[in-house]
Image (cartoon, grey):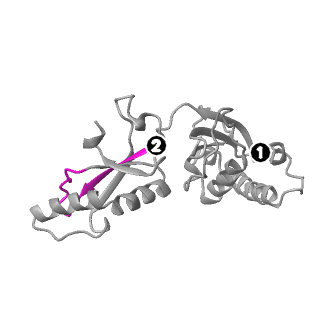
Amino acid sequence: MHSDTLRRPGLTTSLHATFIWLLFTTAVYSASALSSTVYHSALDPQERLAVGEMANLQPWQLLRNAQSEPAHKLGVQTLSIELDERKKGDQRRRARVYQFNYDSQQSRLVLVDLQQGAVQKVQLIDTVHLPLNQAEIALARTLVEQNTDIMQRVNQIQRTRGLSDLNDLSNIEVKASIYEPDNNASTCAVQRCALISLFDQTRTVFAVEPLVNLQNLSVTTLQQSF
């Protein structure tokens, strides 16, 4: 679908595009009834839904030398949707959508005009190290739980603390963050990797730190990555 369709809401060739436009017109009508401070307020759930749908409709600028491979289970992930910060006095409201395509290994920014309900710009970003979303974190946790070696090492630490073995990570605190290595030779320098930090009930960190490559779905540890 061409982005021109989204810029002409009168078209009825796409029920999907029409639905998105209705969401935007409702949000804009509501905003016009409020004071001018609304122009710089946070995005409401309805706006976030419409902006996300609109970004997903935008085609990707695929690389010419991209190899044809089986579709990645994560596909295209919307990493964040946020209000575009504008200069004081500028009442235009825009949203910034950051996405990553696991099939083409590309990051991009989609800029959406909230008043007009139209995509203003789609721009590739030269980095894979954008923040993780919940789908990526959930997959990383699952891969760690399915890794026998990692779980054995975690349970060895549990036993030294006089605690019971873990069958999964549900009984300990888990924090995940995008991993950007200092070493450019690391695979994680060019592919999205999640660094998993584990804490027990006393807030003591585990010595083993799982490192999940979300592109090839492999699991190692931070200590082994050097």
Residue 119 visible at all? yes
Up/down of 211 relative to 141, above or below: above
Q: Position of residue 54 (x, y in %)?
A: 71, 50
Q: Residue 226 occupies which quadrant of the picture?
A: top left
Look at label 1 and name its amino acid. Answer: Gln
Report the disc number at residue 116.
1
- From where the camera sits, is residue 200 visible? no
What secondary structure is marked by label 1?
A: loop
Q: Look at the image and give the residue range highlighted in magenta.
A: 192-208
Q: Tell me the element at label 2.
A: loop
For the point 29% across and 43% down, which residue is it? 222
Q: CA distance from mark 1 to mark 2?
A: 34 Å
Q: Earlier in the sequence, mark 1 or mark 2?
A: 1
Does 202 lie within the magenta span?
yes
Query: On the rendered structure, is 127 left or right of 95?
Result: left
Residue for point 63% across, 39% down: 67
Please report the residue visible at 46 percent of the width from the left and 49 percent of the height from the top.
Answer: 214
From the top left corner, tell me how far across and down residue 184 is, in percent. 39, 28
Position of 36 compared to 221: left or right? Answer: right
Front position in the image: 86 or 45: 45
Please tell me how crowded label 2 is: few (under 14), some (14-19), or many (20+) other residues with Cα within 10 Å.
many
Which numbered tag is attached to residue 213? none
**Which residue is disc 2 drawn over?**
192
Q: Is 17 drawn above or below residue 63 in the view shown?
A: below
Residue 27, x across and y down, in percent = 70, 56
The residue under label 2 is which amino acid type? Answer: Arg
Along the viewing direction, whichever of 58 and 25 lies nearer the viewer: 58
Query: Which sits in the foreground, 131 or 165?
Result: 165
User: From what the image shows, is residue 67 above or below residue 149?
Assistant: above
Q: How many marks?
A: 2
Q: Do callouts 1 and 2 mark residues in contact (Cβ within 8 Å)?
A: no
Q: Position of residue 130 (x, y in %)?
A: 48, 40
